[in-house]
Amino acid sequence: MSGGEERCGARTKAGGRCQWPAGECPWHGGRRRRPVPAQRSERSLPRDPAAMAWWTIGEVVAGRLDPRAASVVAALLRVLTKLESNELPAEAATTAALLRGRLLHGVPPATPEEWALAASLLDAAAMAELRRWALPEGSGQETGDGEGQG
């Protein structure tokens, strides 16, 4: 092996770089280095956030992606995941925001539609608290969502 030959250069288990000649390495020779996402065509990148996260992890572990770039990818994946989980039509998002604003001011839902929306947005404990808000003082009955009425 002469000093001018190109080396494999893949990261070894010991943390160093492989010194076999490029193309002759029995462990790393068959691998082609994958470009970072910005250098890949859009079609070849995973569209699924989970797949992209696993791809990023694999690239960092293999030493082909700078951990700082992976940190940026992780931040963007968090944003994408949050956006996808809250996809509501504009009118429904506005209605949900208005209902949440009313709830923040202590005003319980007024219509059966608002009660249904509140049930889709809140957990059981929060719904029980809302039903308590809707009770007239001393009535002992639930109102507003149809439960307890007969």
Image (tube, grey):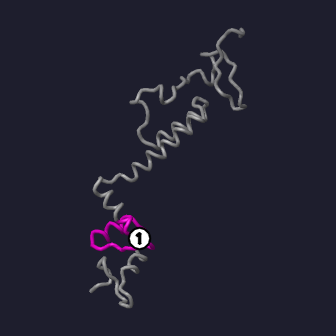
- In the rendered view, tell whether residue 38 sits above or below residue 127: above
For the residue marked with disc 1, what is the amino acid? His
Give residue 128's quadrant in the image.
bottom left
Compared across the picture, whether 86 is left or right of 63 comes to left
| Residue at x 44%, y 50% (from the top left corner) | 82
Q: Residues within 10 Å of mark 1 (few under 14, many from 20)?
A: few
* The C terminus, quarter of image: bottom left
Compared across the picture, whether 124 is left or right of 150 comes to right
- In the rendered view, tell whether residue 35 sits above or below residue 1: below
Depth check: give the residue in front, 122 or 40: 122
Q: Considering the numbered disc 1 on the image, is that residue within a helix, a strand or a loop?
A: loop
* The N terminus, quarter of image: top right
Query: Number of labelled discs?
Result: 1
| Residue at x 44%, y 48% (from the top left corner) | 81
Give residue 25's quadrant in the image.
top right
**Where does label 1 land, which residue?**
105
Compared across the picture, whether 92 is left or right of 6 comes to left
Give the x, y percent position of residue 40: 45, 26
Depth check: give the residue in front, 67 or 108: 108
Q: Specify whether residue 37 is painted magenta.
A: no
For the stretch drawn in magenta, the main secondary structure is helix
Give the x, y percent position of residue 8: 64, 19
Give the x, y percent position of residue 96: 34, 61
- In the rendered view, tell whether residue 56 sits above or below residue 101: above
Magenta part of the protein: which range?
99-126
| Residue at x 38%, y 91% (from the top left corner) | 138
Give the x, y percent position of residue 91: 28, 56
Pick out the residue farthest to the bottom.
138
Q: Specify whether residue 106 is painted magenta.
A: yes
| Residue at x 36%, y 68% (from the top left corner) | 118
